[in-house]
Amino acid sequence: MDTTLLQDQLGELVAIPSVNSGFGGVGEDAIVKHVSKFLRQRGLDVEVQEVGPGLRNVIARIEPEGRGGEPAVLLESHMDTVAAADWAKGDPFIPRIEGGRLYGRGACDTKASLAVMLGVVDYFVARPGALRTPLVFAATADEEVGQSGAFKLMESAGALAGAITGEPTLCQIVHAHKGFFRCRLMVRGVAAHSAFPEKGDNAILRMGRVLTRIASYEEELKGRPAHPALGAPTLSVGTIHGGEAINVVPDRCSIEIDRRMLPEETEETVRAEIEALIEPEGGTVEEGVVRPGLNTDPGSAFAAGLETAVKRHCEGRCEFLAAPYMTNATAYAAAGVPALVFGPGDIARAHTDAEFVELAELDTAFAILKDFLSHE
């Protein structure tokens, strides 16, 4: 593989601002066009899948000779990034190469994975007979906010033998991570003039009692049986809103919570636990977003195949890791597809003011994916 293609693609991708609109960015439209053009130039049929307002996925498929219609392996990487308002040096969208590293917003999270996967597509378009299985490539929208692109992708991805989600894992394998239940809790009271508080019902005080129960619940979670790699489930209160003025008894108060779930926990069980915290105050659970956890068996055939390829190019070393962060792999695991997380770069550099990826890792990641997918 000509490493120039990988580095050039990474530079071009970083130079296209694709900050998620949820962070006030321009979104992914320009990068959708770039990826679509790359694929069409290689003779592939390209599906641009509508996900939501201003959100689109890009999908292409390569069929090996004589293997059409079989379950495919999915290579997927997201196109959006977080914001870059506090970037430390230079312009975050002008890629800078220094000391064997490429700096720029999205360099490791996760345009390096996207560049590598485009390189894999380029390789197998010219060698479809080398593929051991059909290949579906997807560049997805909205990972950094709602992961809506990954869940929408499953509507048209077809039968899948497994999925690899591109994220910075230092070319090792993440097989497990927590899920989450995020929601707003609302309690309502009765407004009144603060000179006559007895005529009202203070919603903030009601929420205070809820917060006391949440604090006890949080401690109880810490004592639950822990996952061997992920630890115990957790809960965090992220926001609180209530009241209109100092001289008005508040008639409503809300908080937003992030309850991190172990892979074996269910939405129904976690929702019931949260409802029990708010119901004594007559409150409600609103606007819940649930993402299940990931826990792919490292001993599965799909995982073992990727492990073999990793060892071949990482001096015999391959670690199966559990991650504290969320990935698009949750969408594929939720559909019953063996899913793993893999890619160049270090997650510790993601979202930072000096994000970078080691350029040598592009070649390593490409070689691993090529070998994993190839008869050669």
Image (cartoon, helix red, strand yellow):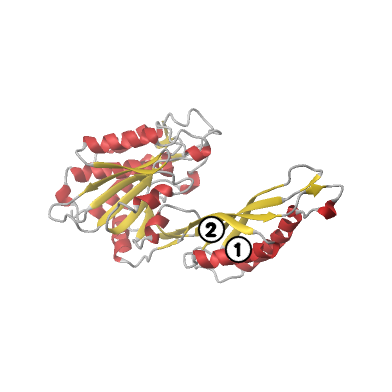
| Quadrant assignment for the N terminus | top left
In whole angstroms, how far apart are the C-alphas of marks 2 and 1? 10 Å
In the image as oriented, which residue stretches furthest toward the left? 66
Disc 1 residue type (three-letter): Ile
Q: Is residue 369 left or right of residue 144?
A: left
Neighbourhood count class around disc 1 (C-alpha, 10 Å): few under 14, some 14–19, many 20 upward: some
> Residue at image x 84%, y 55%?
198
Badge number at residue 274: 1
Residue at mark 2: 181
**Quadrant of the image occupied by residue 307:** bottom left
Query: Please, what secondary structure does the residue beneath circle 1 have?
Result: helix
Answer yes or no: is residue 181 visible.
yes
Amino acid type for the residue under numbered disc 2: Phe
- Element on which disc 2 rests: strand
Q: Earlier in the sequence, mark 2 or mark 1?
A: 2
Q: Position of residue 339 (x, y in %)?
A: 36, 58
